[in-house]
């Protein structure tokens, strides 16, 4: 069955540009982002992998380990990294997984045969410290992803993992947040003093400091 939110992210061992890695070991006790790209030495992918490298400090701040994957072999990945670094003015400091036998692509459903029978689509998975899958998105080959959105979702997931809160449409860190419907008004008054009731089912509060 296809991987779904809440499932355990499949573990695997693979050859990568940082050596042979066990995926769960690599993630350790923190958060993870696994993202696939269709092919090495292609224009959109080059900009995407560069964009992720430029966000390295942002991922580290959030205790997130990143890994990229495609069905290209390791020699191809190693050759391509210097092009990414050169053209995108950055340094790729995360592993790119080589998946020529499509093991990882199969485990994560990254090949969509009706879109392309051979290449991985642009999938992104956010994985929580307990190794459950928290987000899955899939983009077409022709559209580069917005990795600021991935950071935004990580911020929301990390906030809502700590507090009984949810984040509204287009939320950005620091904006007001929504009190979970599961929290009673009495409990909400204790936990989020001064909260606002817009509708009985829509209660908003300041984002907690921690
Ligand atoms: C690209 O990264 O530019 C790309 C890769 C595969 C198909 C189309 C575009």
Image (cartoon, helix red, strand yellow):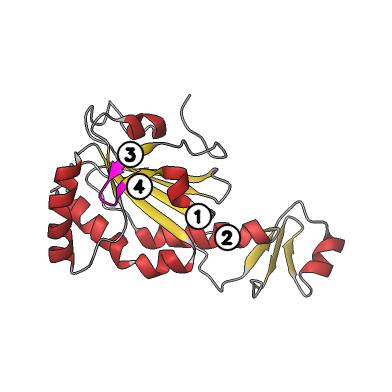
- Residue beneath disc 1: 31
Residue in the picture at 28% in, 46% down: 16
Foreground label between 3 and 2: 3
Foreground label between 1 and 2: 1
Q: Residue 113 placed where, x, y %? A: 28, 26
Judge: label 3 CB < 8 Å from ligand 1: no
- Relative to 170, residue 96 above or below: above
- Residue beneath disc 3: 14
Query: Which comes before the other along the chain, label 3 or label 4?
Result: 3
Point out the stretch of residues depicted in magenta.
14-19
Q: Which mark is residue 35?
A: 4
| Pointers 1 and 2 in contact (C-beta within 8 Å) | yes
- Relative to 87, residue 15 above or below: above
| Pointers 3 and 2 in contact (C-beta within 8 Å) | no
Foreground label between 1 and 3: 3
Ligand 1 picture quarter? top left
Q: Is residue 108 left or right of residue 54?
A: right
Q: Residue 169 placed where, x, y %? A: 53, 59
Please tell me which residue lies in front, 180 or 119: 119
Query: Which comes before the other along the chain, label 1 or label 3?
Result: 3
> Local crowd at mark 3 within 10 Å, few (<14), some, or many (≥20)?
some
Mark-to-mark CA distance, 3 and 4? 15 Å
Mark-to-mark CA distance, 1 and 4? 13 Å
Look at the numbered disc 1 and give the secondary structure of its residue.
Answer: strand
Residue in the picture at 56% in, 56% down: 157
Query: Which comes before the other along the chain, label 1 or label 2?
Result: 1
- Residue beneath disc 2: 158
Look at the numbered disc 4 and give the secondary structure of its residue.
Answer: strand
Is residue 18 magenta-colored? yes
- Relative to 169, residue 173 above or below: below
Foreground label between 3 and 4: 3
Please tell me which residue lies in front, 16 or 205: 16
């Amino acid at each position: 069955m296809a991987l779904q939110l809440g499932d355990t992210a499949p573990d695997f061992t693979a050859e990568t540009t940082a050596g042979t890695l066990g995926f769960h070991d690599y993630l350790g006790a923190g958060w993870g982002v696994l993202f696939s790209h269709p092919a090495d030495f292609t224009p959109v992918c080059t900009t995407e992998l560069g964009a992720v490298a430029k966000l390295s400090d942002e991922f580290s701040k959030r205790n997130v380990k990143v890994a990229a994957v495609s069905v290209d072999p390791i020699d191809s990945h190693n050759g391509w990294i210097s092009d990414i670094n050169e053209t995108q003015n950055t340094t790729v400091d995360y592993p790119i997984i080589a998946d020529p036998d499509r093991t990882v692509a199969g485990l994560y459903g990254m090949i969509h045969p009706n879109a392309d029978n051979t290449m991985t689509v642009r999938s992104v998975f956010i994985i929580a410290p307990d190794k459950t899958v928290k987000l899955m998105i899939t983009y077409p080959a022709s559209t580069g992803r917005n990795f600021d959105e991935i950071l935004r979702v990580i911020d929301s997931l990390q906030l809502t993992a700590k507090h009984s809160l949810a984040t509204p449409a287009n939320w950005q860190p620091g904006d007001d947040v929504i009190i979970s419907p599961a929290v009673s008004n009495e409990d909400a008054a204790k936990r989020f003093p001064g909260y606002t009731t817009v509708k009985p089912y829509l209660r908003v509060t300041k984002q907690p400091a921690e």
